[in-house]
Amino acid sequence: QSALTQPASVSGSPGQSITISCTGTSSDVGTYNLVSWYQQHPGKAPKLIIYEGSRRPAGVSDRFSGSKSGNTASLTISGLQTEDEADYYCCSYVHNVVFGGGTKLTVL
Amino acid sequence: QITLKESGPTLVKPTQTLTLTCSFSHFSLTTNGMGVGWIRQPPGKALEWLALIYWDEDKRYSPSLRSRLTITKDTSKNQVVLRMTNMDPVDTATFYCARIYSSSSSQYGLDFWGQGTTVTVSS
């Protein structure tokens, strides 16, 4: 199972929306909705923000949303805030677990 | 609330075996659908999944590291132990343990994480 592919970096201004893509294969992302997304601030542990492709755990802002098209999952953050600046990782958890390479979000 | 905490040596020598313990509370590894996994993150790099163990003793390993890893659980102590053999300086990383949970209606993925423990491999 190969690592999922994410852009290295994205940026946006406060109030804007950004989307981070996560490309897998028909063996993982394309067939199953078992994609999760994690937010990681520097020096902190990752935090689950999306599971099953589009569901949010309790307490996670509805500014975070997930979707999928074909073999690519996406995380959209709307109404960007400065505290959203962090690294974001997608993850497929079909049979084993595989992470994407991470995307650094800069809020300008 | 659900917590997980990693413990183990902060420094190991090359070729040694690393043993890490994940101690958790407010959930049980005897519950159907429950699991605990290990993930590492080298300095400045991405997350890398290592191993998982489920309530039913099902064990999964990263294909690239399978030969070096052993994961076990002690349900009476609420602990999961990871052993990683033949440590090398490139294995220097922060190691996290995390809960993975699937209920009858949802598969949550790695929903709760420990704070991580940093391991340096150096002679």
Image (tube, coloured by chain):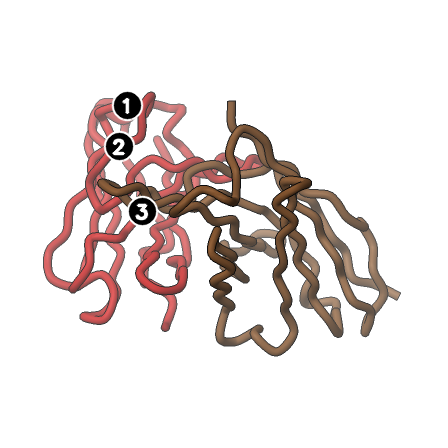
Which residue sits furthest left? A69
Residue under label 2: A56
Q: Colour of chain A?
A: red
Label 3 crowd bin: few (<14), some (14–19), many (20+), radius 10 Å: many
x then y, percent, for residue B19: 75, 57
Q: Residue at x 57, y 54 (%)?
A: B41
Pick the residue in front: B86 or A90.
B86
Callouts 1 and 2 close, C-beta under 8 Å: yes
Dot 2 and dot 3 within a common chain: yes
The kind of residue tagged 3 is Ser
x then y, percent, for residue B70: 64, 66
Question: What is the quadrant of the C terminus of chain B in the image?
Answer: bottom right
Q: CA distance from mark 1 to mark 3?
A: 15 Å
Residue under label 3: A36
First in residue order: circle 1 vs circle 3:
3
The kind of residue tagged 1 is Ser
x then y, percent, for residue A86: 43, 36
Q: Colour of chain B?
A: brown
